[in-house]
Image (cartoon, grey):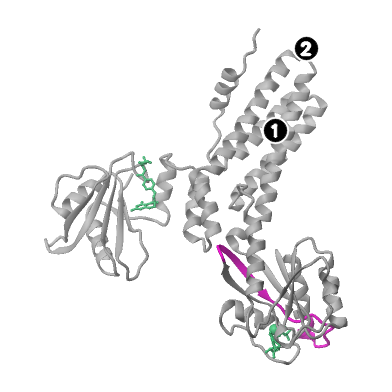
Amino acid sequence: METIAAIATPNGVGAISIVRVSGDNALEIAKKLTKKDDFPPRVAKLCKVYDSNDELVDIALVIYFKAPNSFTGEDIVEFQCHGGVVVSKFILEEVLKHNCRLANPGEFTKRALLNGKIDASQAEAIAKLIETRSREGAKLLSRQLEGELSKFVEEVREKLIEIMAYNEVFIDYAEEDLPESLGKDIEERLKNIEALLKKTLEASKRREGILSGYKVAIVGKPNVGKSSILNKLLNKQRAIVSDIAGTTRDTIEEDIQIGSHLIRIIDTAGIRAAKDEIEKIGVERSKESIKKADIVLAVFDASEFNKEDEEILDLIKNLDKNVIIVINKVDKGIKINLNYFKNFKIVKISAKEDITPLIEKLKEILDSFSSEDEHILISTRQISAVQKALNSIYEAKEFLKTGELELFSYHIQDAIRFISEITKPFEYDEMLDKMFSSFCVGK
Ligand SMILES: Nc1nc2c(c(=O)[nH]1)N(C=O)[C@@H](CNc1ccc(C(=O)N[C@@H](CCC(=O)O)C(=O)O)cc1)CN2
Ligand SMILES: Nc1nc2c(ncn2[C@@H]2O[C@H](COP(=O)(O)OP(=O)(O)OP(=O)(O)O)[C@@H](O)[C@H]2O)c(=O)[nH]1
Ligand SMILES: [Mg+2]
């Protein structure tokens, strides 16, 4: 395997920068650049680093990770040098003069994967952890990096392999009147796995927003202060605000942090029976936003409740999602009857003065989303693997019903293959070993 190198830290001014080198020549390169000979593994050693003209480049910490005990499983050398945009580039250039090439994107992680240091789900977790913009996302991804999903896959796999083992016995002994309970047992076990997979898929769908941002739509009739609320949440004049009804004509989306959560906030056009063609399209988009949202902020003016507000109330009345009734403009006094909103969560705010009650309520709902400590799937690759495994189980079940056990077995094998794809390719030998070690035929 070729030796690779790259700067691991972002390009900019900072205290420290890291140049990482992985592969057989890493140690040799460290020796050449530092003119030192002795690098005990995993020791941070302060070294002068020289260029090819023997001129001093930096005084840096150099750490040698001896294979296989490194991130990639290969020999790694890290030059932890002074930060800024020059030194690390300089060192990288010197490194590249010695039998080593620039790493491709993700190549260190790829090598960690190929060398069995991490599995595919952990590699995906690393990629997303680097990109995530919320603490909740980071918490979830660090758990997947730790191997939570890998463990789940292993569990499901073992359960399916046990079913295969039971089924083999079933096939071998079918003639000799095996107790019916064995068939029932297989059915029961399968049901259990199906429920596990379904639950994981549902949780993944429900909690998709943890990484991409939960969608929060601000809706209401024109002029109630929706855009003012958006601006206040963003702390800047993002949307045009005016006292002309119908100011916002298109939806406006922005990402913000609320506590440890990321949300995508969507300001919408005021909903009314619009005559203008463009406004009509805007109103349609507003209604679409309600459908897509995880949380709906239905905004009303504290001083007025009319037919248009009733229509808003109709739109949100039977929604199977979180709705917050936002009574805005309370600085002018509350003149409307709050009984209209019985059984809803209500907050009273003034977008002109203070929206803290709204932020608190949002936090409360978002916290409730993540208090469920389920593991979830974080990529379409993972989701499709579970979906395919589930489909194979459905097909297998049909053959269990008709007693076509060879075909049943065939589809269970498929399910095992698909679920294993999340972490690694399935090895048939391993399953056979497992079958005979965990199952005593006793004949
Ligand atoms: N300086 C530095 N910080 C870093 C990294 C890095 O590569 N360099 N990482 C890069 O992503 C992350 C840490 N990930 C790492 C994962 C494994 C090993 C490692 O040496 N593994 C050995 C020993 C394990 C042990 O001692 O428990 C091994 O797996 O055999 C190092 C870093 C975050 N911080
Ligand atoms: N007194 C008072 N006025 C407010 C408050 N919030 C918004 N306004 C005013 O209400 C008017 C409408 O505000 P917008 O934020 O543009 O309302 P909107 O709901 O986005 O309106 P459309 O985009 O037309 O649907 C503006 O003149 C705002 O200054 C508030 O809390 N108190
Ligand atoms: Mg507006």
* Mark 2 residue element: helix
Quadrant where ligand 3 appears: bottom right
Residue farthest to the left, as pictured: 54
Quarter of image, res 292: bottom right
Quarter of image, res 281: bottom right
Does 20 appear in magenta? no
Name the quarter where the C terminus is drawn.
top right
Say left or right for 320 vs 83.
right
Highlighted magenta segment, given as a residue range: 259-280
Q: Mark 2 points at which residue?
A: 175
Name the residue at 75% across, 62% down.
Answer: 321
Sequence-wise, the earlier of marks 2 and 1 is: 2
Q: Do the residues labelled 2 and 1 touch (CB within 8 Å)?
A: no
Q: Is residue 403 visible?
A: yes
Q: Name the residue under label 1.
A: 411
For label 2, being within 8 Å of ligand 1 is answered no
Tell me where residue 217 appears, x and y as whole percent.
70, 71
Tell me where residue 302 appears, x and y as whole percent.
77, 82
Name the residue at 49% across, 61% down.
Answer: 131
Residue farthest to the top, as pictured: 443
Quarter of image, res 352: bottom right
